Image: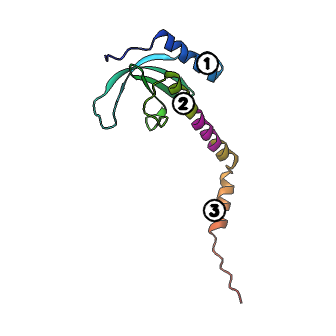
């Protein structure tokens, strides 16, 4: 394993308190070890300690990448991975709050799109009629 220290008990409590404040109920993150690319062009993976939380199919990972350096991301699957736009943070809670905020914005956007699609979904027969009316050619001849 790496020379990077695990999260301290104080750091875990700060993470729990921040998550509790955001989600409005106690949340216990899992302490895990993850493999990360520390630099975009680097092929080798480096093992790092991380705090992990999954809720409603969204996974949030907060990794320690140095003694006082952190990175975070959230993802819904292999093809939907998101960061905060900033590679590293030197403040653990700032890193976590930013990740939670970006994820909340993404969730809001996803729900708006889903609500919009549900609001404007019409039965198949109406879609067929609309399609026909839009693609009907006018065969009348004007005099």
Residue 114: image location, x then y, percent? 63, 42
- Mark 2 secondary-structure assignment: helix
- Mark 1 secondary-structure assignment: helix
Residue 99: image location, x then y, percent? 53, 30
- Residue at (64, 59) in percent of width and height: 128
Residue range highlighted in magenta: 103-113
What is the quadrant of residue 42 in the picture?
A: top left
Whichever of labels 1 and 2 marks the residue nearer the N terminus, that label is: 1
Circles 1 and 2: CB atoms closer than 8 Å: no
Circles 1 and 3: CB atoms closer than 8 Å: no
Residue 37: image location, x then y, percent? 34, 31
Q: Image check: 131 left or right of 82?
A: right
Q: Nearer the viewer, residue 31 or 67?
A: 67
- Mark 3 secondary-structure assignment: helix
CA gap between label 1 and label 3 equals 50 Å
**Front: mark 1 or 3:** 1
- Residue at (53, 22) in percent of width and height: 93
Q: Quadrant of the C terminus?
A: bottom right
- Report which residue position mark 3 lands on: 131
Question: Residue 20: which numbered mark, if any?
Answer: 1
What is the quadrant of residue 110 in the picture?
A: top right
CA gap between label 1 and label 2 equals 15 Å
Main SS of residues in magenta: helix
Q: Nearer the viewer, residue 30 or 88?
A: 88
Question: Residue 98: which numbered mark, if any?
Answer: 2
Q: Image check: 40 left or right of 26?
A: left
């Amino acid at each position: 394993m790496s020379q990077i220290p695990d999260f301290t008990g104080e750091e875990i409590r700060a993470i729990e308190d921040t998550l509790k404040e955001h989600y409005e109920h106690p949340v216990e993150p899992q302490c895990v070890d993850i493999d990360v690319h520390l630099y975009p062009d680097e092929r080798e993976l480096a093992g790092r300690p991380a705090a992990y939380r999954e809720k409603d199919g969204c996974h949030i990972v907060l990794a320690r990448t140095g003694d006082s350096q952190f990175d975070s991301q959230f993802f819904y699957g292999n093809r939907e991975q998101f960061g905060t736009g900033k590679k590293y943070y030197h403040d653990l809670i700032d890193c976590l709050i930013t990740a939670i905020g970006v994820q909340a914005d993404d969730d809001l956007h996803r729900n708006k799109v889903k609500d919009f699609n549900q609001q404007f979904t019409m039965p198949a027969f109406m879609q067929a009629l609309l399609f026909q009316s839009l693609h009907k050619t006018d065969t009348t001849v004007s005099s």
